[in-house]
Image: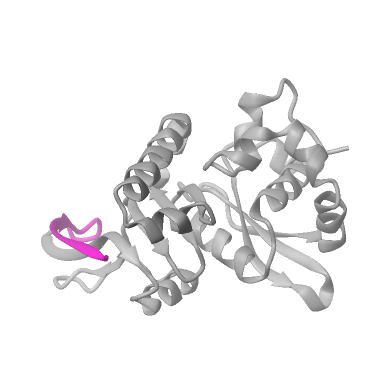
Amino acid sequence: MSWFDVKVMTCPTCQREFEAGTAETINVTRMPWAREQILAGHFHTVECPHCDAVHHVDRGFLYTDFGRNHFVMVHANASLGDWPALEEVTGKVFSDVTHHAPPLVQQMATQFTVRAVFGLRDLEDKLRLWDAGLDDRVVELLKLELMVQTPALARRADLRLSVQTVAESEDRLEIEAWSHDGSHPPVLYGAALARYRELDARRAELEDRYPGLFFKPFASFRRLARETAEPSEVS
């Protein structure tokens, strides 16, 4: 089921109020256009009827895709610092939804990928990787290596890393470093898919080393700062 809220918003440009609808839950199995808008960066954009300014709305919502077995709770960008608690919320919502579902859905639930992400760009990142048949958790370890090996990134713990392109013909990922507050201009970096395959071949070892990354909803290299004494390049 999909559900949209219509609320009164204040335009950041002209400071006038207007009504606009944004999603509380979306089921992209029934609304494939919503998935297309997310990947194009156009989802949750609203236009002020007074000054025609277009703004992105940063809000939480539930994303489900029963065709691909995806269950993603999208939390607001601004709440990233609360990820431990919101990861627990994500797991509980998934458990509650599936516990009260018909038996067929309960059986399907064991096959679902459950994630907690922060903002639409994090969701785009996951969708691109899954579309390319890549494990987002292994890619997070590539991001960790990129962060550690790049001095400009290592000095800015606030920066976010999002996969923009899976360039299979060039055997690489294009990863954009950006800041939520706009204080850092977006910069593209490359990561070798050959390195992804090396890490993926060591899955059992990495699962033992980083159980939170591989078995909990917040699949992000950021959690490793809390769970390992000295998060570093994966050796």
Give the color scheme: rainbow, by chain, secondary structure or one colour: one colour
Q: In this view, does 21 lie above or below 210?
A: below
Provide residue 232's location: percent of width, then percent of height.
78, 33
Q: Can residue 221 be seen in this view?
A: no
Q: Which of 89 and 117 is in front in this view?
A: 89
Can residue 99 be found in the magenta stretch?
no
Q: Is residue 147 above or below residue 54?
A: above
Q: Which residue is drawn at 40% across and 51% down?
A: 74
Q: In which quarter of the image is the C terminus?
A: top right
- Indicate the quadrant where residue 50 lies: bottom left
Q: Quadrant of the N terminus?
A: bottom left
Q: Can residue 201 be seen in this view?
A: yes
Provide residue 137's location: percent of width, then percent of height.
66, 49
The mark tally for this picture is 0
Q: Which residue is drawn at 83% across and 49% down?
A: 199
Question: Residue lying furthest top in this view?
Answer: 229
Q: Residue at x 53, y 48 (%)?
A: 179
Provide residue 148's location: percent of width, then percent of height.
77, 39
Q: In this view, does 209 lie above or below 115?
A: above
Q: Which residue is drawn at 37% across and 56% down?
A: 103
Q: Is residue 40 above or below residue 100?
A: below
Report the span colored magenta.
1-15
Provide residue 214's location: percent of width, then percent of height.
65, 42
Q: Which of 18 and 84 is in front in this view?
A: 84
- Indicate the quadrant where residue 55 lies: bottom left
- Indicate the quadrant where residue 95 lies: top left
